[in-house]
Image (tube, grey):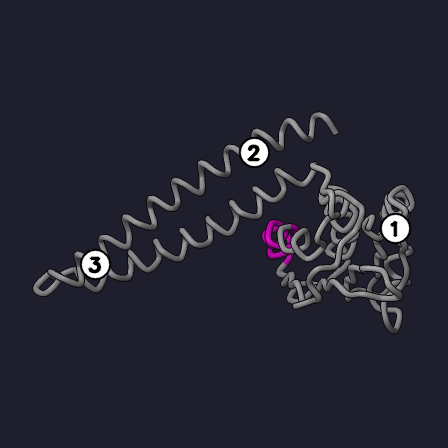
Amino acid sequence: MRDAMFMGRLTAGATHEMQNILATIRESGGLMEDLLAMGGEGFAHAERFKKGLCVLSEQVERGMALSEQLNYCAHAPEPAAAGTEINEAMRSLVGLCRRDAARGRIALVLAPGRTGLRTSLRALEVMGLVGLALDLCLSLLPRDTQLMLSVEEQGGLAVVRLDSPGYETLSAQPGFAGVQQAARAMQAGLCAGPGGQGLVLSLPKAVA
């Protein structure tokens, strides 16, 4: 954990600098848009220039989102007195895992869920446990499909549900034992999702 804290501190500093750089690019792009709007008449390449600035703006926003998610990961090893807010952890995990899912042409989606649900686990532990389950599910899904995660409350506990594939198929895979072991180590529950589809991870309550 000491190594994770050290790397997190370095990563946090780097992501703050990345955000500053992207903010400067955003402001410069906005200034160029304003100048083009004021004096762009007669400029032969005005439309191409506008399209270029639009692409620049989109990529800056994408970079800002990724750096924010990475910054969250940098702080993930730190204990939180009030517990980890699970939706925040899942937003960062899903955002950073979408590229891997897209390689298999699988759409990774985080469903709108209940906010404010917390667990006593550190964010790093939550992301690591769900990440194991996520990797197992992605390895079994066919191309051009979707995997949805949702954060819900069941029986007074916060749960993370992955909606596919079937639990029976998942439990027959060699990697399933690793998910079970990690869940037990964190005092988290593991069971089939509704109708035997997917799996549900029940996370320990935050300390009041």
SS for tag 3?
Answer: helix
Q: Are marks 2 and 1 in contact (CB under 8 Å)?
A: no
Mark 2 burial class by Cα count in 10 Å: few <14, some 14-19, many 20+? some
Circle 3: residue type: Asp
Give the left or right position of residue 32, taking residue 163 as reference.
left
Q: Secondary structure at mark 2?
A: helix
- CA gap, disc 1 and disc 3: 54 Å
Residue 143 in the image: above or below residue 16: below
Callout 2, which amino acid? Thr
Label at residue 126: none
Q: Residue at x 81, y 60 (%)?
A: 159
Classify residue 52 by image quadrant.
bottom left
Task: Give the main secondary structure, helix, strand or loop, of the magenta stretch.
Answer: helix
How far apart are labels 2 and 1 at the CA level?
Answer: 28 Å
Residue marked by disc 1: 188
Q: Position of residue 2 (x, y in %)?
A: 72, 26
Residue depicted at x 86% and y 71%? 194
Residue at mark 2: 11
Check the image and report above or below for 3 versus 69. Answer: above
Of 32 and 99, nearer the camera is 32
Check if residue 101 falls in the magenta segment: yes
Number of the label disc, if any, that sits on residue 34: 3
Q: Earlier in the sequence, mark 3 or mark 2?
A: 2
**Quadrant of the image for the N terminus?**
top right
- The answer to which of marks 2 and 1 sits earlier in the sequence is 2
